[in-house]
Image: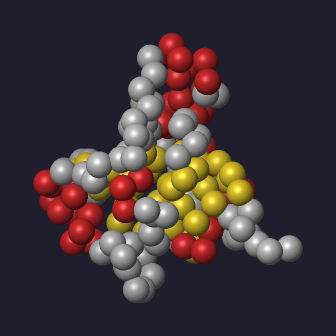
Amino acid sequence: MLKWSDVLDLAANGNPVPAHKVVKSDAEWREQLTSAQYQVTRLTGTERAFSSEMCSLFAPGLYSCICCNTLLFDASQKFESHTGWPSFTQPIETNVIAYRFDGPAFLERVETICNTCDAHLGHVFPDGPKPSGLRYCMNAVALQKVRNTDAG
C-alpha cells in the first residue's frame, strides 16, 4: 500500500516502470478525444468541480485511463471526498500512475499522470482516509468505467 512518503519519493527520485508505453501524435490524441478530454489529459487542465456524476457513483467496478485504457483504479478504493472530483485511496497497481511535483515547492502538490500514455489525471494529496491517508483526486473526464466487478 502506497503512503504519502512513497508518493513523495517517487515524484523526487523516479517513477515505477510501466508495463508498456502508448505514444501518439498530438493529431492522433485530438482525433481520439473530446475537447474536454483533450484539455484535461493532454494540456493538464482541470474540469469544474462537481461537473460529473462520477463523483457520486460507487457501484463496484474498474476505472481506466480514457486515453489508453490502462486500468487505474478499483471502485472499492473510491470514497466521497466532498471535493467535487472522484477520489480514490490507491491505484490498482503501483506502476500505473506516475508522479511529479506541480506548483510551488512548499505546497508539495503532486500531479498524477497515467504511466502508460502520460495523460494528466489529477493530483494526489495526503488528506485521504486511513489506512493509506491518500486522496487521488481525479478528473472524471480522464477516466472511464470499463468493468463492473459485482457478482450480480
**Outermost residue, top direction?**
27
The residue sitting at 58% across, 50% down in the picture is: 64
Quarter of the image with the N terminus in it: bottom left
Quarter of the image with the C terminus in it: bottom right
Drawn side of residue 74 relative to residue 145, left or right: left
Q: As displayed, is residue 35 above or below residue 41?
A: above
**Outermost residue, right direction?**
152
Which of the 4 image quarters holds residue 128?
Answer: bottom left
Residue 111 visible from this viewpoint: no
Drawn side of residue 39 relative to residue 144, left or right: left
Q: As displayed, is residue 1 above or below residue 41?
A: below
Name the foreground residue: 30 vs 43. 30
The residue sitting at 51% across, 67% down in the picture is: 88
Q: Position of residue 67 (x, y in %)?
A: 55, 36
**Outermost residue, front direction?**
19
The residue sitting at 44% across, 69% down in the picture is: 90
Q: As displayed, is residue 7 above or below residue 117?
A: below
Which of the 4 image quarters holds residue 150?
Answer: bottom right
Q: As displayed, is residue 34 above or below residue 133?
A: above
Drawn side of residue 68 relative to residue 20, left or right: right
Q: Position of residue 25 (x, y in %)?
A: 44, 17
Q: Position of residue 10 (x, y in %)?
A: 22, 58
Residue 149 visible from this viewpoint: yes
Which of the 4 image quarters holds residue 47?
Answer: top right
